[in-house]
Amino acid sequence: MQAYDIDTKRPLGKGSFGQVFRARHRESNQVVAIKRIRFDPLAVGIPGLGLREISNLRALSHKRVAKLIDAEFVPEGGVYLIMEFADMDLHRFIATIKRNHNGGSMPEPLAQRLSRQFFKGLAYLHENGIVHRDLKPGNILIDKKQSLKIADFGLSRIQTLPYTPVSRESSTLPYRPPEILLGASVHVGSYDVWSAGCIVAEMMRAGVHLFPGSRSHGVEAQLESIFKSLGTPDEVIWPHVNLLPGWKKIKFPMYKPKSALELFPGVSSDGMDFILTIRRALLHPWLNKHVPAWFPENLGQCYLRKPFPGRLKLADIQIPNDGPDARGKRRLDSRESGVGYYVYSRSSSGDKPDKKKPPKEKKKKGRKVDQADGPILEERSPSMDEAQIKALPLDERFKRAADYKSRGNSAYTQRNFELAVEMYTQAIAMSPRPDAVFYSNRAASLKLDPKYAKALNRRAAALEATGNLKDALRDFTALAIIDGFKNDTAASSVERVLAKLSTQQAEEILRNKEPRLPSTTFVGAYFAAFRPRPNVILPDYATEGDHQLLQAQEALDEGKFAKAWELVNAAFTSGLSEHWKEGLAEALNLRGTFKFLMGDTTSAKEDLLRSTQAWPDLVQSWVKIASVHMELNEAEEAFAAFETAIEKDRDFFFILTDYIKAADDYRHSSELDPTFVFSQIQLAVAQYKVMDLDACMSSFRKCQLDFPNRAEPYNYYGELLLDQQRFQEAIEKFDRAIEIESQKTVLPNPLPLVNKALALYQWKNDFITATELCREAMALDEECDAAVATLAQLSLQQGRVEEAIELFNKHATIARTEAELIQALSYKNASQAQLEFQKNYPDMVGQLTAMAQGMQAPF
């Protein structure tokens, strides 16, 4: 572990087998978390739980699962797991929210957002056959962006078929499901679902356990806590519960179930389902009503495969018929399926459901293949593969192809176009040589039945294979919408083709793109981040180029960025005084800055390097060249440039992502120059990142008092309030920022208008006012990327697809980086595919509109 500086004085956490510490890599400066597991190599060897954790983590890669960076064994007996760092765990986060809300629970929209992230990570685990078995707030991490990650896989197990009993080590009592408490030895995905429900409940109950139990009384007290809330089960509501090992050991009174409103006071009623699969949870209204869903989910609501490939029906699980354990295993599965019925039956608030059975459907009589409602051939028998077809004699292939064509013609005349397309497809595959009639017949059938999924999928695949990505996206999108976004293969195909098409278009655009300045809002924000410095003092006998440099700096002060760019270039053309090194350094600094903002990073690097050579004491050039190095992934050179800047000016501080230390640096910076507003704002932001909300709010209040006529403190404060879902207070701050900006005659900032639009949309779904505010922002700066992107999403949400496409196209033209360009093109291409769907399938426009209204914009 010589590559890391480990802070052993303040452990981040403790477990049964080791401790977790904060550490920093000595070369890259990356902050990580290191879990140290100690063991006696001679006595017990490496603990099985440690090996299991390493093995399972190496197999996982998902943004909602804590990433294992490396694992290192030490000879004296120990293993170090090097993990990505997060600022705190969910337990501490809930406590912080409670403290900052005067004992209140987490705001419901925030809990919804975190729950959605949590269930996405859990769906990924189950999808890959892993049961965590130790989910609790202490094993869920939250980073500075309030992004959630599942951690600590020491107790995790890989799901197998047939299900096999596992060892008895299991989760903390308040999160352990009742079947495990009663001795079930087969642990499946429902184990994690129960724990997840308890965690979500804890978020909504200000950290109070849903089923508190008692450590001193153990399992018995935990079961009693569950039964007091959900009612005591019996054979009727939980089949085979009496077969669980612990059932007969403990006798409980027959408690009656409590209502959901009693268990979850203050939670909206659409969050009251008690038991769900992970997939259903992600599609549940409680998680989709307010929670942002980044593209491409807003197109298809949720692109998920089935959460557990191994979740088969009991009849499909192959359990050996012989042996003493066979019957026991079947009973275990049966008992565990009973717990779902038990919990589900307890989720009502007392009303009994209607127990009438649905009427049975009459079985259809046997049909011939060529009847209009008959099954297609491949549903009757498996299709032959290419090798089997080629093995047939030519005469047999011609005969079978003609037979398929005849069947297709019969289905076509009876208007069963789906079957017709399938028969013509079989004929094409069987025929020894291409037959134009087969293709034309299939095309005619598809035209008359454009919703035939299999033919759409084949055409889309062929279009993708031939490089016609735009039309392939059209067909895959249609297929996904027609199937109600239940076709996971089509959904993943949409995502794949969309990424390929958008990346291809972005590469073509960047090859031919002329350098251009970003929006005035973006450029102004960049220059405002640096303390103002006096303009150059012209030398004696100044040249025309010297005067143009001074004019460029004056234009910069007035916010005339295009004019400043033009003048600094003219200064080099006219020529600067030969021995005026300071002027040359300032000119190169300004030109290099503009090039960096326009995305010409290589040329910017050359100018800024020349600036440092011309006048090494110009600290700002060292800071900017460091930013260029970071953009080019040249970390070592970047840190060297920052160190040089610090050597040149001891009052200069480079702020790393260590927000605790950053807060001290910002505080020192504010003391050195109390007139610079951004040091005070960033101090408050750094305090917010480490969840020190009291200090953060105090810093913002001080900043507002110190700078009553500056809009930035109000706007930034509003953003943090919006992040906490405190909408009314956020809007008040945005209104004050808008009022101050409206009094400016030079470069009024449109961002408070955009932020207020976002707040009104998220709070009240007020599309009309939010749209007006975005248009007002664009009137101030027509190339404000935040305003353009937000207005595009609002237009899309309201069904104004053509308008949204124009705005996404505009966003693409002003995108500064390749990533921004690809994202804008992705939205544009997805919207165009949706528009084509509306034109090709007018009868489904109403259904598509209803789907769109049920989705949330990605902000």
Image (cartoon, rainbow, N blue to C red):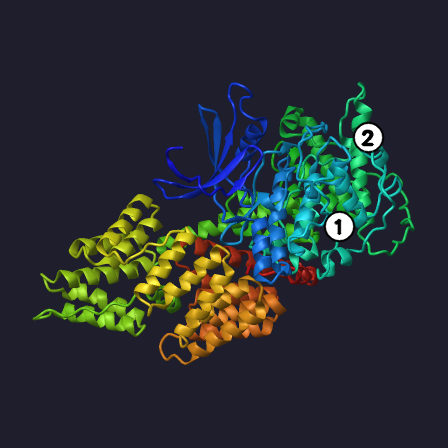
In the displayed structure image, the side of residue 65 where residue 840 appears, left or right: right
Which residue in the structure is indicated by mark 2? 331
Query: Between 538 and 249, which is closer to the camera in this rendering?
Result: 249
Which residue shows up at 15% across the image and 70% down it?
A: 537
Which residue shows up at 52% across the image and 26% down it?
A: 39
Q: Around disc 2, counting alpha carbons within 10 Å, would you say few (fewer than 14), some (14 to 19), or many (20 or more)?
A: some
Residue 518, located in which quarter of the rendered image?
Answer: bottom left
Which residue shows up at 50% across the image and 76% down it?
A: 735
Seen in the picture, residue 859 relative to 458 is either above or below; the reply is below
Tag 1 secondary structure: loop
- Identify residue type, mark 2: Arg
Cα distance in 3D space between marks 2 and 1: 24 Å
Seen in the picture, residue 388 relative to 810 is either above or below; the reply is above
Q: Position of residue 111 (x, y in %)?
A: 62, 56
Q: Position of residue 849 (x, y in %)?
A: 66, 63
**Among numbered discs 2 and 1, the one appearing first in the sequence:** 1
The number of numbered discs placed on residues in the rendered structure image is: 2
The answer to whether one can see residue 447 in this image is: no
On residue 778, the disc is none
Task: Tell me the quadrant of the picture where the N terminus can be found.
Answer: top left
Q: Position of residue 585 (x, y in %)?
A: 19, 60
On residue 274, the disc is 1
